[in-house]
Image (cartoon, helix red, strand yellow):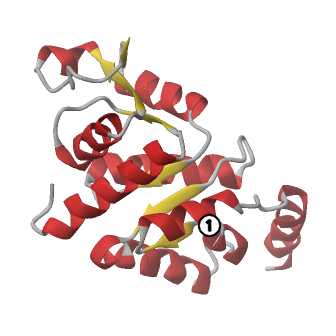
Amino acid sequence: MGYHRAYREVAEELGKLLAGQQFNLIYGGASVGLMKVLADTMMANGGHVTGIMPQHLIDKEVAHGGIQNMIIVNSMAERKTRMLEMADAFVALPGGFGTLDEISEVLTLVQLRLFEKPLGLLNTKGYFDHLLSFLDHGVSEGFIREEHRSSIVVSFEAKALLKKLNSFQPVEMDKWISDLKTESHAG
């Protein structure tokens, strides 16, 4: 949950907004953390929630028993693949290693145009500031292209984040691939 009440409050706000706009939530299906808060808030406000969880985590009793739909998979990799396939957009709330893993995977898939789904970071209390600084450093050092860094949707506020996600435009792949080839042969 994090140490500050603000994390829980923004998860609740996002849940109300998503339910009010009749979005469905697809998440890992856990009964812990901010995603549980988000799922519970959505359901309390008439929203639909789907969880995707490997059997080994269900066996450890971390599955949310109250959601409308639980998809059981064999592995964490299969879980992530199913979430990537089913979702139309991705929102990361403050979290740990699993959140970082999912952010990285989505950014890579968007960069390669394997799909054109936006990623939003709900930057409560500046939680993602250090990650964003790392990405900015990657741009300044020539390892991350500015257009890919700019494709990440960031907001401190849930309502503003959803508005920005609705206007997401993916980066044109042919141009950056051509630029990358030119840059690689110039050096």
Please state which of residues 94 and 137 is positioned toward the viewer in this rendering.
94
Q: Quadrant of the C terminus?
A: bottom right
Q: Where is residue 67 in the image (x, y as percent from the top left)?
A: 30, 24
Q: Position of residue 57 (x, y in %)?
A: 20, 22
Tell me which corner region of the image, top left, top right, bottom left or bottom right, holds residue 152.
bottom right
Q: In this view, does 117 lie above or below 65?
A: below
Q: Residue at x 69, y 55 (%)?
A: 111
Q: Is mark 1 on a helix, strand or loop?
A: helix
**In the rendered structure, which amino acid carries the disc numbered 1?**
Lys
The residue wearing badge 1 is 164
Q: Which residue is drawn at 40% across and 48% down?
A: 101
| Mark 1 closeness class: few <14, some 14–19, many ≥20 residues within 10 Å | some
Q: In this view, does 75 lie above or below 98?
A: above
Q: Which residue is drawn at 86% across and 70% down?
A: 179
Q: Where is residue 171 in the image (x, y as percent from the top left)?
A: 78, 62
Residue 63 is left or right of residue 48, and the answer is left
Residue 145 is left or right of residue 81, and the answer is right
Q: Is residue 152 above or below residue 186?
A: above
